[in-house]
Amino acid sequence: MHDVIAGNEHTVVLLTIWASIAGRDLAGKAVHVCHVRHGKVSEVWALHWDQAAMDDAMTEVIVWSARKHSTAGGAVTKDRASHGWSDIF
């Protein structure tokens, strides 16, 4: 964690992240904006500097999960125009 900025309704966290997702090593910077209601985090908005790498890794996770849990051979698609990725089963 690089820094935290907090107010009454929002907390902003500046991060340097390292992760292994779907066999990929990712490293980069991120910002998480947390919406706080009644003293608890109710929403988190995440921005990653290399969103394309995160999208690719998460798509691999979704495909793996769909194959593992699907009994009907569901379809999984990547839609970069809308949220970077989506899954359709």
Image (spheres, rainbow, N blue to C red):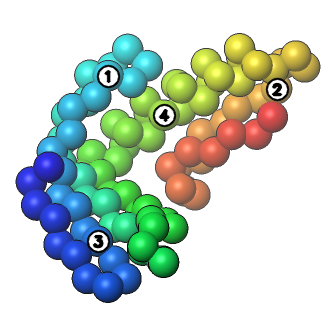
- Disc 3 crowd rating (10 Å Cα; few below 14, some 14-19, many 20+) is some
Left or right, 21 with respect to 28, comes to right
Find the distance from the CA under tag 2 to the CA under tag 4: 17 Å
Q: Residue 10 in the image: x percent, y percent? A: 33, 77
Amino acid on which the number 4 mark rests in the picture: Met
Q: Residue 76 in the image: x percent, y percent? A: 70, 32
Q: In terms of sequence position, does the residue under pointer 4 or pointer 3 come before the other? A: 3
- Disc 1 crowd rating (10 Å Cα; few below 14, some 14-19, many 20+) is few
Q: In terms of sequence position, does the residue under pointer 2 or pointer 4 come before the other? A: 4
Q: In terms of sequence position, does the residue under pointer 1 or pointer 4 come before the other? A: 1
Label 3, secondary structure: give it: strand
Find the distance from the CA under tag 1 to the CA under tag 4: 11 Å
Q: Residue beneath label 4, please? A: 58
Q: Residue beneath label 3, please? A: 11
Amino acid on which the number 3 mark rests in the picture: Thr
Amino acid on which the number 2 mark rests in the picture: Gly
Which is more foreground, mark 2 or mark 3? 3
Which is more foreground, mark 1 or mark 4? 1
Q: Quadrant of the C terminus?
A: top right
Amino acid on which the number 1 mark rests in the picture: Ser
Label annotation for residue 20: 1
Label 2, secondary structure: give it: loop
Which is more foreground, mark 2 or mark 1? 1
Q: Residue beneath label 2, please? A: 74
Q: Residue 88 in the image: x percent, y percent? A: 76, 39
Residue shown at the point (22%, 61%) measured from the top left: 13
Find the distance from the CA under tag 2 to the CA under tag 1: 26 Å
Find the distance from the CA under tag 2 to the CA under tag 3: 38 Å
Residue shown at the point (26%, 82%) measured from the top left: 7
Which is more foreground, mark 3 or mark 1? 3
